[in-house]
Amino acid sequence: MRDTHYSRKIHEFYRAHWRMPSYAEIMDITGLQSKDSVFKLVTRLERAGILRKDRRGRLLPRSIMGEIKLLGLVEAGFPSPAEEELVDTITLDEYLIQNRDATYLLKVKGDSMKDAGIVEGDMVIAERTASPKVGQIVVAEIDGEWTMKYLRKKGTAYYLEAANDRYPDIHPEGELKIAAVVRGVVRKY
């Protein structure tokens, strides 16, 4: 029961800072008296499936929110009678993240991707990849500056295209590096 309280404190820290706390910070937020106690707590939380460690031993949450009921479908066309039926449970992490170690969130600034449904203030889920595909929305460094656009190709040359007619295509003068592919968008209302 006590571990649940500690787990809640660790997840509250994660949501507030967008990173997991260090062992010293876990000591502070839980009131534990030693790093050995924190190590034992982390081990128990790992066994319970609440926390995990990446390849470098850094702490990661297993799930940001826990499971949510998946009740079925909602009609986005013509209205239809609704019936609540529990189909399954799913975590948003399971649904949105394929490779946790290569995935991160970025906050969107600007309106160049509005016609793709990505607007300022949204959070995009980006996954580092070595093999982006033409047509995907990518996070890219082009001539030393960072942006998010569609990856396009004409002949043998790659370029970036906005999802807003007010913005011109961006053709690299020097180098185009694709850092990640956008896998999802999160928006709060």
Image: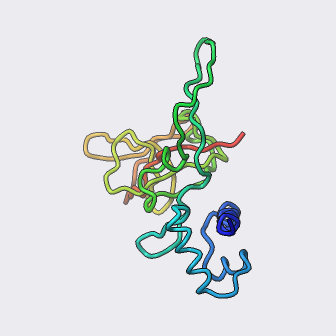
In the image: residue 38, left or right of residue 96: right
Compared with 79, 45 (above or below) is below
| Rendered residue at 58%/26% (across/down) | 85
Q: Quadrant of residue 166?
A: top right
The C terminus sits in image quarter: top right
Q: Nearer the viewer, residue 111 or 65?
A: 65
Quadrant of res 101: bottom left
Residue 161 location (% of width, % of height): 45, 41
Position above or below: 31 against 105: below
Q: Name the residue furthest left.
A: 156
Count the marks: 0
Which corner quadrant of the image does residue 151 belong to?
top left
Measuring from the top left, give residue 188's x and y in whole percent: 69, 43
Q: Measured from the top left, where is residue 23 in percent x and y?
A: 61, 80
Counting from the top left corner in percent of width and height, residue 7 is at 65, 65
Closer to the camera in the image, 89 or 176: 89
Residue closest to the far front: 1
Q: Residue at x 43, y 60 (%)?
A: 102
How is the structure coloured here?
rainbow
- Quick one: quadrant of the N terminus? bottom right
Q: Residue at x 50, y 40 (%)?
A: 162
Query: Is 62 in front, or is 175?
Result: 62
The residue that appears at 60% across and 11% down in the rendered structure is 78
